[in-house]
Image: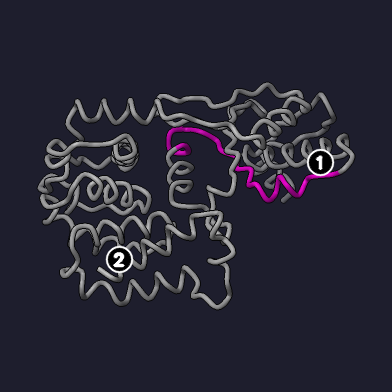
């Protein structure tokens, strides 16, 4: 239980912007080193873990986006036969964690498992329903023929996920202003059929692009994306979206006392990033207009051979 609590506490702390300096202290073990140590120490003792400990470990690995498929699979083998003892939070955290890690576990979710059955026996809050919906999206993503959530619960989880409140940031608005300076229409908080809200949607070179304006909460203290961010990006791409992430530190680096120069830098940054995301090449751009050569970068490289 102490191992699980350590993983949970360290991950929760390092997800907090206010704790960034604490987590970055060179005298503390790195997050990667901590999880490597846990991966060595925990497996022989997983049978001693209570359901809360197993779920907390899974959540910590997923939230930190620490990749260790073997360890997550071992958690599944231990958790699966004991799912009937899990409460709603433990079930939701476990399902969400496996979706983030993208590790398939027949022991937890397969035809002989009791996950779907147990989900129909407990009460859920909105946060847990959101996690269940992302698990359902992952089930569709993988194509696994696991038992789905009970129909009523699946509808509830989708409705909760699709109705989650969004709060556009000031940085997001500024990205939209810069897109306007490039002559590109944009839409904010575009709700797609799968329930996700995309920060900004625009079109570049005939390609529909979703722009995720990612503030500090989307990253660990080492600027690697959190598990939530990894999952959203992967699932959006699976459902056909071309994505561009605008990290906060790159956008903040474009500041200048001269607002015109700042806007020029922002436009140049977005044009280059959109080129890279879509595989197109801009031939000319300027404040208020843009011309695009849709020649594929791959085709262009091939032609030069």
Q: State the image coordinates of residue 92 (x, y, percent, origin top left).
A: 27, 45
Q: What residue is rendered at 50% in x and 30% in y? A: 166
Q: State the image coordinates of residue 285 (x, y, percent, origin top left).
A: 82, 31
Q: CA distance from mark 1 to mark 2?
A: 46 Å
- 192 to the left or right of 27: left
Q: Mark 1, residues whose alpha carbon is within 10 Å: few (<14), some, or many (≥20)?
A: some
Circle 1 or circle 2, nearest the eye:
2
Q: State the image coordinates of residue 46 (x, y, percent, origin top left).
A: 20, 69
Mark linked to residue 4? 2
Q: What residue is rendered at 28% in x and 71% in y? A: 2
Q: Which residue does the numbered mark 1 point to in the structure image?
A: 265
Q: State the image coordinates of residue 66 (x, y, percent, origin top left).
A: 42, 61
Whether residues under marks 1 and 2 lie with C-beta atoms below 8 angstroms apart, the answer is no
Q: Which residues are magenta?
A: 236-256
Does the magenta portion include 251? yes
Q: Nearer the viewer, residue 271 or 305?
A: 271
- Figure check: 235 above or below 78: above
């Amino acid at each position: 239980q102490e191992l699980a609590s350590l993983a949970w506490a360290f991950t929760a702390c390092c997800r907090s912007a206010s704790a960034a300096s604490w987590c970055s202290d060179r005298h503390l073990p790195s997050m990667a080193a901590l999880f490597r140590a846990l991966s060595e120490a925990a497996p022989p003792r997983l049978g001693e873990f209570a359901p809360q400990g197993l779920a907390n470990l899974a959540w910590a690995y997923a939230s930190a986006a620490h990749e260790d498929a073997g360890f997550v699979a071992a958690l599944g083998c231990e958790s699966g036969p004991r799912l009937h003892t899990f409460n709603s939070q433990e079930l939701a955290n476990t399902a969400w964690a496996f979706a983030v890690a993208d590790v398939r576990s027949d022991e937890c979710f397969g035809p002989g498992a009791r996950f779907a059955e147990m989900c129909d026996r407990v009460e859920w809050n909105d946060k847990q329903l959101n996690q269940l919906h992302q698990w359902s999206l992952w089930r569709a993503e993988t194509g696994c023929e696991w038992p789905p959530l009970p129909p009523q619960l699946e509808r509830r989880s989708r409705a909760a996920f699709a109705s989650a409140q969004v709060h556009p940031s000031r940085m997001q608005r500024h990205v939209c202003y810069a897109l306007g300076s490039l002559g590109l229409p944009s839409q904010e908080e575009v709700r797609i059929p799968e329930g996700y809200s995309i920060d900004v949607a625009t079109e570049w070179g005939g390609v529909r692009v979703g722009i995720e304006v990612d503030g500090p909460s989307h990253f660990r203290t080492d600027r690697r994306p959190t598990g939530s961010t990894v999952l959203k990006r992967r699932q959006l791409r699976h459902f056909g979206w071309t994505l561009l992430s605008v990290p906060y530190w790159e956008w903040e680096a474009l500041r200048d006392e001269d607002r015109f120069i700042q806007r020029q830098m922002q436009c140049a940054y977005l044009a280059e990033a959109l080129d890279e995301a879509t595989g197109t090449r801009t031939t000319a751009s300027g404040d208020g207009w843009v011309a695009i050569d849709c020649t594929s970068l791959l085709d262009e490289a091939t032609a030069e051979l």
